[in-house]
Amino acid sequence: MPYLARLLYVFAVQGLLTVALVQSIAWAQVPGIDSEEQALLTLINNYRASQGMPPLALSPTLSQAADFHSNWMADNNCYSHQCPGEPDPVQRTWDAGYPNVATGFGENIAAGVATAVEVFEQWGNSSVSNRTMISSRGTGQLAISSTGNSIFRAVGIARVYKPASNYSYWWTAVFGTIDDTGTPSIINQLTILDNPNLTIPFKKNYLYTFQAMGGVAPYAWSVKGKLPPGLRLQKCGNLQGWPRKAGTYTVNITVRDKKGNQLSRVFTLNVLPPINGSFRLDRKPATRYWPENQVMIFNLAGQQLLQQHTSKVTVPQQWTQHLSSGIYLAIVEDRDSTGQVVRRELKKIAIKN
């Protein structure tokens, strides 16, 4: 698998890459869900309901991917999203037969606790794992979250007990944006289906349609707060226009159904400007890590175009001046004193030369 494909599973970039299936796995049948796995599914769905999010269906393919990883962690005493010799999370999910991870997927793991309540509390106390459970944007070391405008609609959960291993109990939950169970959910409660973080291109024609379910259609949409200049929200739910000012805008979007029931949610709209040949990292240089960062730039097809080391937070313009104007991906790695990668940051950048 190309280097970029192996890295980007931790970011779950929406619709940017196609990763070839390069390794075949012999999947075992996943046993029926046990009482604690069912309890965790119930806890997660109750939590999602309190946040205005739809419940997750229990996916058999995601459950296979989760069971595979829990067993691998237990057999190898390795608490990680990818253990040595193991296929990465994207590969595991695809090989289990899940229809599509390109629209976003996520993974939470836990070890050393036996009950669903303990796992749920651990994930709730982690900002990244918590965002994964409620389908909000985020990335991190112990959870993988989706980006873009999709939300999770299915999950697979696996608890493996191997008393001779270091932690005895090993948990994995794999989240996906497609419900592949074949049994559509019936939801009476009015629900907004959109991710609350939208990324909007600068000075380009833009159209995004908000979606709702439950209640009684048709739906009417409205907004309170300042939209990005050049955009307007139509009653039908279309957010469209030509955004002419970059920045971050926080607005309250409300949907009302035919019977007058309504639901509101806060949305963050990020209008990204083009950057003239250079870009800044969203953090200060790490002082306790290796003094240099490795920066790699790829095109959207996954081809690596540049690899450099720098101790600064600004990538010099001469690095990118030979690139044509367009959208690129940049990966920044921090390494510890042994040379091991301890942190990665992904940026989607626009270069205008």
Image: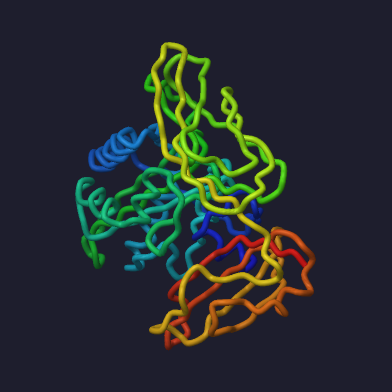
**Rendering coords of residue 233 (x, y %):** 58, 31
Q: Can I make out residue 61 in this image?
A: no
Q: Which residue is drawn at 64% across and 66% down?
A: 2
Q: In the image, is 269 to the left or to the right of 316?
A: left
Q: Which residue is drawn at 35% across and 54% down?
A: 129
**Image height check: is 343 above or below 257?**
below
Count the marks: how many?
0
Q: Which residue is drawn at 46% across and 25% down?
A: 255
Q: Nearer the viewer, residue 217 or 207?
A: 207
**Rendering coords of residue 109 (x, y %):** 34, 56
Q: Nearer the viewer, residue 173 or 236?
A: 236
Quadrant of image for the C terminus: bottom right
Quadrant of image for the N terminus: bottom right
**Rendering coords of residue 311 (x, y %):** 53, 85
* Type of colouring: rainbow
Q: Which of 203 and 111 is in front in this view?
A: 203
